Image (cartoon, rainbow, N blue to C red):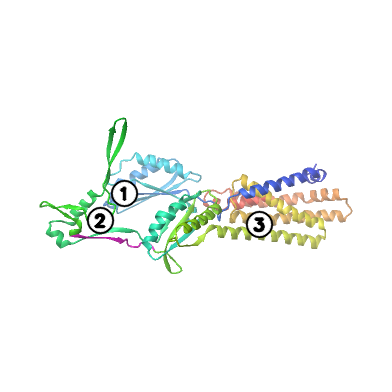
Amino acid sequence: MSTAKFCIRHKVSTLLAVIMIVIFGAVFTTQLQMSLLPDMEAPMAVVVCYYSGATPGDIEELVSRPLETAVLSVPGVDEVSSTSSDSVSQLQITYVDGTDLDIAATKLREQFDMLSLPDGATKPVIVNLNISDLMPTAMIALTGDDLSQLQSLAENVVAPALERIDGVASVDIYGGVEQQINVRIDTARAAGYGLSNSYISQILAAENLLYPGGDLQSGSKKLTVSTDAKYTSLEDVANTLITLPAGGTVRLSEVADVRMEAEDLDAVAKVGGTSCVILQVSKQAGGNEMAVARAVETRLQELAAENPNIRYSVPYIASDYIDQSVNSAFSNIWQGVLLAAVVVLLFLRRGGSTLTICISMPVCILSVFVLMSVLDLTLNMMSLGGIAMGVGMIVDNSIVVLENINRFSDEGHDRLSACVDGTQEVTSSVVASTLTTLAVFVPLGLVEGMAGDMFRDFCLTIASLI
């Protein structure tokens, strides 16, 4: 028995199947994650190690080569290149497709812990490259009169609050001005005391430290002791006692000008010509970008209500563009369905055929949402484009089948035979046309690498729909 004949003879079963698709489609639609673009993760990482004062040759011999040897012992590494410059060694690592970057980073750290790098070399820093970080979820501009205060407000209040939002991976701050203590030594006065710049610098470094002091047994308790002598204020630095070579001491403020000043600017951020501090919010991989963006907006409103010093604007937020793309895609889909119904009504002049088009298209779209949830696809610009294209192809196939059924009906066949025979006659043509489309898009969706990440949602959505 053919599919068309089965569906016609078992109307109740067919109706129940359609109702189930509608219900499950509506449920799964609310569970789909929404984002602007598909998740794309480049299988790459950068390792940076600093060795102050070393020449490029020393960096190459003592740091870069040992790091390269350690990296090549990690499974999944495809290619390693290094750059050695004054005091800095930088390695670019390319992994094979499908490598879990978090696991690879853990194995890299294990290998680096077993290395014997020169004294004075810092621990290697591993940075996984994620394409999603290039498209932040939101960018917030804090405005005010004092950039140093805005920097402090961003670091101590706004950024910690946003980082606690579920789904936020990081909050980066740009354009602010940090405060630092500058010590300008009076050369003539210091020379009168027999002090040099290097000697004063060594004294300050020795006085500003946090050092573990071991353990202390107090009865049944074991306490950890540490020496905390770090500077906490400008006065602590100014009142530092400098031991004189000839004996005695002198305060730093007597031989130097100690002030709290702003650091030199290395980046400038402006909104509408006004200097500001920019906070870039990035979501976690696989997170719901729409939910994160809305949570960020809500938290900012709460912070502004709690602290009147927080004045902000939102130059970019992903939820606005996601809403625009979703609304535009669904608008195009419904317009296509409506126009298809109008075409069927004008040419076939049958209300039943027109009603079939109007009902079948939404049911097909809801069934796609079920498959998208099963395949773990997100509702983004690419998948919405796939839905729009797939709907057009279904409309084409539907018109071909309905027109042939209408022809059989005009030739005098009864309704059952017209539906069954008319469908069977064009089934091979419709299937061949559909398979041709699948042969184009399915291989593209299975391509590995960044191209596959970009087009996978688009291709799998089309394949699921048709």
Image position of 84 (left or right of 94): left
Please name the residue shown 20% across and 58% down the image: 253
Q: Identify the residue at the far right of this view.
A: 412
- Disc 3 vs disc 2: Cβ atoms closer than 8 Å? no
Q: Secondary structure at mark 3?
A: helix
Front one among 320 and 107? 320
Q: Position of residue 449 (x, y in %)?
A: 52, 49
Q: Secondary structure at mark 2?
A: helix
Q: Secondary structure at mark 1?
A: helix
Calculate the distance from the C-alpha at mark 3 to the C-alpha at mark 2. 67 Å
Badge 2, how many Cα within 10 Å: few under 14, some, many 20+? Answer: few
In this rendering, the answer to whether 215 lies above or below 363 is above
Q: Which residue is mark 2?
A: 235
Q: Amino acid at mark 3?
A: Ala
Q: Which mark, by number, is residue 60?
A: 1
Report if residue 263 lies within the magenta region.
yes
Report whether residue 272 is seen. Answer: yes
Instruction: Count how many numbered circles sit on residues in the image.
Output: 3
Q: Quadrant of residue 380?
A: bottom right
Q: Amino acid at mark 2?
A: Glu
Q: Earlier in the sequence, mark 1 or mark 2?
A: 1
| Magenta residues, start to end | 255-267
Q: Which residue is mark 3?
A: 388
Q: Position of residue 138 (x, y in %)?
A: 50, 57
Q: Earlier in the sequence, mark 3 or mark 1?
A: 1
